[in-house]
Image (spheres, helix red, strand yellow):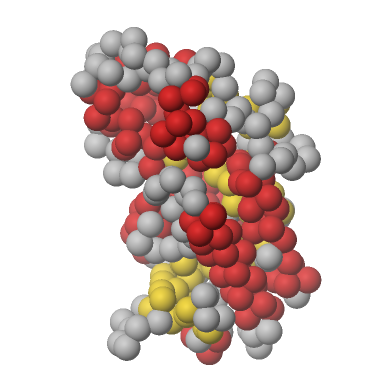
Amino acid sequence: MKILVTGSTGLVGSALIPHLAGGGHNVRRLVRSKKSLAKDEVGWDPAAGTIDAAGLEGLDAVVHLAGENIAAGRWTSEKKARIRDSRVKGTRLLAETLSRLAKPPKVLVSVSAIGYYGDRGKEILVEESGPGTGFLAEVCRAWEAAAEPAVRSGIRVVHPRIGVVLSRDGGALKMMLLPFKMGIGGKIGTGEQYMSWISLDELIGVIQHVLTVETLAGAVNAVAPRPVTNLEFTKSLGRVLSRPTMMPLPAFAAKLALGEMAEELLLASARVEPARLLASGYKFRHPELEAALRHVLSK
């Protein structure tokens, strides 16, 4: 297939592009406009609302990953605006442009996140579960809604709602590794909050799956089938690293350090299950946390 990828330099994009190219696909990257573009690049500027529509003609698929990093720095009002705008404005611009093409792609994989569900305690959450409350839930609802122009034009649109991505090269796990290796890792708050996770390799497999399985559309929970509590995650990571995990981070300390971000990223509970992936026949390579951690950290 001829596939366009946005967010190509991020954690997921950097792994997805060589995977797709290695499978024989012709991969192009949608990049912020600059003076000279490589032959595999198409320019856009989502903040300015500009995009090279001609460069999008004749695509078979688009994988839209672009968005401001939600965990890079405390959430100020300006940071929150960038998080929202980078997702909503960029997605709307892309979806509207694709919908007007003479030859639009058959599928748009426009990622979302399990932040859609908000803080739900022990409730088991599947794709039909309603949205939660809070900043991330509001962002995710608007983010997914921004792709509606593509849906209305007949493009199959899939929203993988991604959980905590496990990779030693970035994301939450990378930030955890140093304190845990030093023996000062521990649970956060009560440790009872659920973490819904997926290994980076698995996420690449999920994206490949939703690109090709034509019955999948709308929300698809991109998480492993065995969510764990923060305490279980802590113990598993400690075992894999052969380190003690006796230094908890109290909830008040997390809130003091990170404010609202701590409440929504570290202390909120989302027990999410990948019901649609399983029903579509997807076979998880890393369904269990400890085995997934050993795989990720052995690279």
Position above or below: 256 against 128: above
Q: Left or right: where does residue 163 sit relative to residue 156?
A: left
Question: In the rendered image, which quarter is residue 91 located in?
Answer: bottom right
Q: Is residue 95 visible?
A: yes
Query: What residue is rendered at 67% in x and 77% in y?
Result: 96
Position above or below: 161 against 225: below
Q: Left or right: where does residue 17 sit relative to residue 56?
A: left
**Camera-side residue of 86 and 63:** 86
Position above or below: 120 against 86: above
Q: Position of residue 147 (x, y in %)?
A: 68, 65
Q: Position of residue 172 (x, y in %)?
A: 39, 37
Quadrant into which the C terminus falls: top left
Query: What residue is rendered at 71% in x and 40% in y?
Result: 133
**Camera-side residue of 141 and 169:** 141
Total marks placed: 0
Q: Position of residue 141 (x, y in %)?
A: 70, 53
Query: What residue is rendered at 41% in x and 74% in y?
Result: 31
Query: What residue is rendered at 68% in x and 50% in y?
Result: 138
Question: In the rendered image, which quarter is residue 178 located in?
Answer: top left
Q: Left or right: where does residue 94 sit relative to residue 148?
A: left
Q: Left or right: where does residue 38 sit relative to residue 62?
A: left
Q: Is residue 241 visible?
A: no
Q: Position of residue 93 (x, y in %)?
A: 61, 75
